[in-house]
Every structure is written in structure tokens, then in C-alpha cells.
Amino acid sequence: MPDMLVKLYTLPNLEPVIAQQRAAGVEIRRALPPEKHVVVEWVRREFGDIWASETDVSFARQPVGCFIAVEGQQMLGFACYEATCKDYFGPTGVSEAARGRGIGAALLLAALHALRAEGYAYAIIGAVGPAEFYSKVVGATLIADSTPGILGGMLRAK
């Protein structure tokens, strides 16, 4: 899967997206360090060990590099940044039951705005699946010859 590049200085405004989610009963916020075990286990259950490992790493930085979507006490999705590499977005995911509600776009924008606030002008979305989604939401473009990217040669469990 290829990587994509995003211009952080042209991102859509975050506030209306967060307000829309809040009006629908979904809170988009940065995860808290004491929630690490809950968030990492949810990611492991929903998306597997590799993404759980990356999510775990996102809690090792200050501020925490993981945003979560919560409805009541139920986690619906997550988005990490600077988990695998500096200036990288991902992994990210929304539970199957909560897809189609704009939660993924809100999480993406929250994380990318955080990267912008930390001083980056561009960000890399690593090993994308839904390239059309990233193009539509944030104007991301494919990076030529970026497969297998940073994850090439990664050890995998047998």
C-alpha cells in the first residue's frame, strides 16, 4: 500500500467537524495516559496486534499522539500520529458499526491539526488503504514509489 502526502497548511477547519460530532453525541478528543490499556486493547480487538503496537507507542509521547471517538463510555474509533515515524499519520480506524457517521474524518482532521500545531507543514499518511477517502477529506496525494515504504521487511508473527 502506498503512502500519501498532505499539505497541513490547507486543512479544512476542525471546529465545525468536532461540533457536528458533539451534536451527534460523539466526543472526539485526545486520549489520556490512564486510558492507554483500554484504548490499546480496543484497537487490538478491533484491528489486530500490529495497530495495537503502534497505538501503544503513541502514548509514549507528550502530548499523547492518539485521538479517540467516544459515545457515552463506548469507544468508536481512534487515530494516531507519530507512532511509527515522525510526521506520520496512522494507524486509524472506526468500529464497523460506527462507520459512515463522519467519525473517521473527524479523527483524521483532529490528528492532522495536531501535527500542524506542532510545527509541521506536511504530513505523511503511511500505507493507506482508502486513498480516495484521504484525497476527498484532506486533499492527500499519492507518493510515487512508496510501496512497501517504511514497513517493508517488517517482522511478522507466524
Image (cartoon, rainbow, N blue to C red):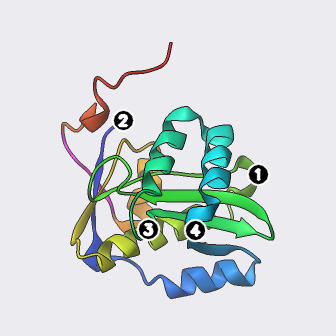
N-terminal of the pair, mark 1 or mark 2, is 2
Q: What residue type is labelled 3?
A: Ala
Is 138 inside the magenta-drawn segment?
Answer: no
The N terminus lies in which quarter of the figure?
top left
Is 141 inside the magenta-drawn segment?
Answer: yes
* Residue 133 marker: none
Q: Position of residue 31 (x, y in %)?
A: 57, 67
SS for dot 3: helix
The residue tagged 2 is 1
Image: magenta residue range? 140-144
Q: Where is residue 51 in the image (x, y as percent from the top left)?
A: 51, 41
Q: Where is residue 97 in the image (x, y as percent from the top left)?
A: 76, 51
The residue tagged 3 is 111
N-terminal of the pair, mark 4 or mark 1, is 4
N-terminal of the pair, mark 2 or mark 4, is 2
Query: Mark 1, residues whose alpha carbon is within 10 Å: few (<14), some, or many (≥20)?
Result: few
Q: Nearer the viewer, mark 4 or mark 1?
A: 4
Looking at the image, residue 139 sits to the left or right of residue 23; the answer is: left
